[in-house]
Image (cartoon, rainbow, N blue to C red):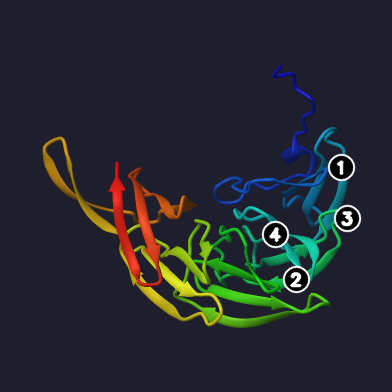
């Protein structure tokens, strides 16, 4: 019917600061809870609401605050967890991965991962890659990292890759490899394929092609594109709006069609 069931002014209720570019994080539904990385005053970092009523269910307090990365759900040692990569505007810059119990908001683990620059923010969603491991990335300084958790949720860094520095897209995991777009700026952004277990780079390339538009042949690039795996291949939306149908594998890439 379109009838409004509930609403809350979170910016007002939680005194949420504006930060550089406003807010960019999506909420996530976990069971009956709607979980948001709010980053409000008094260290009210992550908040859950009853998805049907809007009533507050729990608050996880942490000084790391909000980011532009959206929370994800995963299973670590058989337990469902909510992964929240925090870190927006702060002096000094701070942020990282919070591993939470989505039912209670209990903080199970905390992994610092944030560039040591004020003009930076975390924006890439955490990617669970199996075997109790999570991949994180940021583009300003630290780049990519693979973290493993033991049964007590104590983190261990398995590898770091500063040049797998993804700005905001969600990397795709398939058949033991991660595919993502590395690079802070539009010019020079590259598609990268990395083996998950080792951090070894299979290849790195700028996705470029020629296309005729209004009688002119132009050289186009994907730049800081987004990826979605579908029907055995990859939809790639370029930064400037081209839509590509790609074949990606550890051997390289091929454009199957474009529009």
Is 249 located above or below residue 31 in the figure? Answer: below
Q: Which residue is mark 3?
A: 104
Looking at the rendering, which quadrant does residue 196 occupy?
bottom right
**Residue 238 x, y percent position in the rendering:** 36, 49
Residue plotted at (34% across, 48% down): 244
Q: CA distance from mark 2 to mark 3?
A: 16 Å
Q: Considering depth in this image, is 135 or 107 the residue closer to the camera? A: 135
Neighbor class of circle 3 (other Cα within 10 Å; few <14, some 14-19, many 20+) is: few
Q: Which residue is mark 2?
A: 110
Is 38 located above or below residue 115 in the figure? Answer: above
Q: Which residue is mark 1?
A: 56
Q: CA distance from mark 1 to mark 2?
A: 23 Å
Please indicate whether residue 117 sits to the left or right of residue 30 in the image.
left
Q: Considering depth in this image, is 22 or 162 the residue closer to the camera? A: 162
Image quadrant where one finds the C terminus: top left
Please indicate whether residue 192 sits to the left or right of residue 110 in the image.
left
Choose the circle earlier in sequence order: 4 or 3.
4
Q: CA distance from mark 1 to mark 4?
A: 18 Å
Q: Nearer the viewer, mark 1 or mark 3?
A: 3
Q: CA distance from mark 4 to mark 3?
A: 15 Å
Q: Secondary structure at mark 1?
A: strand
Residue at the outermost left position: 215
Kindly identify which numbered label has been placed on residue 84: 4
Residue plotted at (45% across, 52% down): 226
Is disc 1 in contact with disc 4, using a CB cutoff of under 8 Å?
A: no
């Amino acid at each position: 019917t379109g009838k409004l069931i509930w609403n809350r002014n979170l910016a007002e209720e939680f005194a949420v600061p504006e930060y550089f570019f406003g807010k960019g994080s999506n909420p996530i539904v976990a069971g009956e809870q709607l979980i948001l990385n709010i980053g409000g005053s008094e260290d009210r970092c992550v908040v859950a609401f009853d998805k049907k009523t809007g009533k507050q269910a729990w608050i996880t307090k942490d000084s790391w605050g909000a980011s532009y990365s959206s929370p994800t759900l995963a299973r670590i040692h058989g337990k469902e967890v909510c992964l929240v990569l925090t870190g927006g505007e702060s002096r000094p810059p701070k942020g990282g991965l919070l591993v939470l119990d989505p039912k209670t908001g209990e903080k199970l683990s905390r992994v610092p991962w944030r560039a040591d620059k004020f003009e930076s923010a975390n924006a890439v969603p955490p990617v669970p890659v199996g075997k109790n491991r999570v991949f994180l990335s940021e583009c300003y300084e630290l780049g990519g990292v693979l973290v493993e958790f033991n049964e007590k949720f104590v983190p261990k860094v398995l590898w770091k890759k500063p040049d797998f520095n993804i700005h905001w897209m969600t990397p795709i995991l398939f058949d033991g490899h991660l595919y993502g777009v590395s690079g802070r700026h539009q010019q020079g952004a590259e598609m990268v394929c990395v083996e998950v277990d080792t951090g070894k780079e299979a290849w790195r390339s700028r996705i470029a092609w020629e296309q005729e538009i209004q009688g002119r042949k132009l050289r186009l690039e994907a730049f800081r594109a987004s990826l979605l795996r579908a029907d055995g291949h990859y939809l790639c939306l370029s930064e400037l709006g081209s839509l590509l149908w790609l074949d990606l594998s550890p051997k390289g890439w091929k454009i199957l069609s474009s529009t």
